[in-house]
Image (tube, grey):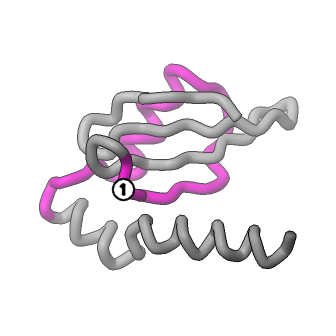
Protein backbone atom coordinates (compact mmCIF):
# COMPACT_ATOMS: atom_id res chain seq x y z
CA UNK A 1 0.00 0.00 0.00
CA UNK A 2 2.82 2.40 0.77
CA UNK A 3 4.24 1.82 -2.71
CA UNK A 4 0.88 2.63 -4.28
CA UNK A 5 0.50 5.84 -2.29
CA UNK A 6 4.03 6.89 -3.25
CA UNK A 7 3.25 6.15 -6.87
CA UNK A 8 0.15 8.32 -6.74
CA UNK A 9 2.08 11.18 -5.17
CA UNK A 10 4.78 10.91 -7.84
CA UNK A 11 2.10 10.94 -10.54
CA UNK A 12 0.43 14.01 -9.03
CA UNK A 13 3.78 15.76 -8.61
CA UNK A 14 4.49 15.25 -12.31
CA UNK A 15 1.25 17.03 -13.27
CA UNK A 16 1.71 19.92 -10.79
CA UNK A 17 3.90 22.99 -11.14
CA UNK A 18 7.04 23.64 -9.15
CA UNK A 19 7.29 26.79 -7.01
CA UNK A 20 9.44 28.41 -9.73
CA UNK A 21 6.88 27.59 -12.43
CA UNK A 22 4.10 29.03 -10.24
CA UNK A 23 6.02 32.28 -9.74
CA UNK A 24 6.62 32.56 -13.48
CA UNK A 25 2.94 31.92 -14.27
CA UNK A 26 1.90 34.61 -11.76
CA UNK A 27 4.45 37.07 -13.19
CA UNK A 28 3.13 36.42 -16.71
CA UNK A 29 -0.45 36.87 -15.39
CA UNK A 30 -1.38 33.37 -16.54
CA UNK A 31 -2.73 32.55 -13.07
CA UNK A 32 -3.89 34.52 -10.04
CA UNK A 33 -1.82 34.83 -6.89
CA UNK A 34 -2.77 32.50 -4.05
CA UNK A 35 -4.01 35.44 -1.93
CA UNK A 36 -6.65 36.26 -4.55
CA UNK A 37 -7.64 32.60 -4.81
CA UNK A 38 -8.02 32.34 -1.02
CA UNK A 39 -10.27 35.41 -0.98
CA UNK A 40 -12.51 33.89 -3.67
CA UNK A 41 -12.69 30.51 -1.92
CA UNK A 42 -13.57 32.08 1.47
CA UNK A 43 -16.90 33.14 -0.05
CA UNK A 44 -17.75 29.49 -0.69
CA UNK A 45 -15.87 27.44 1.93
CA UNK A 46 -15.05 28.55 5.47
CA UNK A 47 -11.70 27.57 6.93
CA UNK A 48 -7.96 27.92 6.51
CA UNK A 49 -6.08 26.78 3.43
CA UNK A 50 -3.50 24.31 4.73
CA UNK A 51 -2.19 23.12 1.36
CA UNK A 52 -2.22 24.59 -2.13
CA UNK A 53 -0.93 23.06 -5.35
CA UNK A 54 -1.17 24.34 -8.90
CA UNK A 55 -1.78 21.45 -11.26
CA UNK A 56 -2.95 20.72 -14.78
CA UNK A 57 -6.73 20.33 -14.86
CA UNK A 58 -9.13 19.34 -17.61
CA UNK A 59 -9.41 22.88 -18.93
CA UNK A 60 -6.10 24.41 -17.84
CA UNK A 61 -4.29 25.14 -14.61
CA UNK A 62 -6.16 24.77 -11.32
CA UNK A 63 -5.40 25.36 -7.69
CA UNK A 64 -5.99 22.21 -5.65
CA UNK A 65 -6.67 23.46 -2.13
CA UNK A 66 -7.00 21.57 1.12
CA UNK A 67 -9.05 23.56 3.63
CA UNK A 68 -9.36 22.89 7.35
CA UNK A 69 -12.44 24.29 9.10
CA UNK A 70 -12.49 25.43 12.71
CA UNK A 71 -14.47 22.28 13.55
CA UNK A 72 -11.76 20.05 12.08
CA UNK A 73 -13.51 19.20 8.82
CA UNK A 74 -11.22 18.87 5.81
CA UNK A 75 -12.52 20.05 2.45
CA UNK A 76 -10.84 19.96 -0.92
CA UNK A 77 -11.56 22.69 -3.45
CA UNK A 78 -10.57 22.86 -7.09
CA UNK A 79 -10.30 26.45 -8.35
CA UNK A 80 -9.63 27.75 -11.85
CA UNK A 81 -6.17 29.32 -11.47
CA UNK A 82 -6.82 31.96 -14.12
CA UNK A 83 -10.27 33.18 -13.06
CA UNK A 84 -10.54 32.21 -9.39
CA UNK A 85 -13.84 30.39 -9.97
CA UNK A 86 -14.48 27.46 -7.65
CA UNK A 87 -14.94 24.45 -9.93
CA UNK A 88 -15.67 21.87 -7.25
CA UNK A 89 -15.58 21.42 -3.50
CA UNK A 90 -15.88 18.44 -1.23
CA UNK A 91 -13.75 15.54 -0.07
Q: Quadrant of the N terminus?
A: bottom right
Q: Residue furthest top?
A: 44
Q: Image check: 11 left or right of 69?
A: left
| Residue 68 falls in image quadrant | top right
Along the line of sight, which residue is nearer the eye, 61 or 27? 61
Image height of 79 relative to 1, above or below: above
Q: Image check: 42 left or right of 67?
A: left
At numbered mark 1, what does the secondary structure look like: helix, strand or loop?
strand
At horizontal 58% and vertical 75% (from top left) the residue drawn is 10
Pointer 1: what residue? 56
| Relative image position of residue 80 (x, y in whole percent) | 34, 39
| Relative image position of residue 17 (x, y in whole percent) | 38, 69
At horizontal 43% and vertical 29% (from top left) the residue drawn is 86
Confirm whether the magenta stretch covers residue 81.
Answer: no
Confirm whether the magenta stretch covers residue 37.
Answer: yes
Query: Total of numbered circles in the picture?
Result: 1
| Relative image position of residue 81 (x, y in whole percent) | 32, 45
| Residue 84 falls in image quadrant | top left
| Residue 74 falls in image quadrant | top right
Q: Residue furthest left?
A: 28
Along the line of sight, which residue is nearer the eye, 74 or 56? 56
| Relative image position of residue 82 (x, y in whole percent) | 25, 43
Q: Image check: 66 left or right of 16?
A: right
Q: Which residues are magenta?
A: 28-57
Along the line of sight, which residue is nearer the eye, 62 or 35? 62
At horizontal 49% and vertical 59% (from top left) the residue drawn is 53
**Around disc 1, counting alpha carbons within 10 Å, would you say few (fewer than 14), some (14 to 19), or many (20 or more)?**
some
Q: Quadrant of the C terminus?
A: top right
Image height of 54 relative to 22, above or below: above
Amino acid sequence: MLFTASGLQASKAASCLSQQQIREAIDKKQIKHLAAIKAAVRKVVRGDVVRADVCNGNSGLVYELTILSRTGTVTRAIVDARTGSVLSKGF
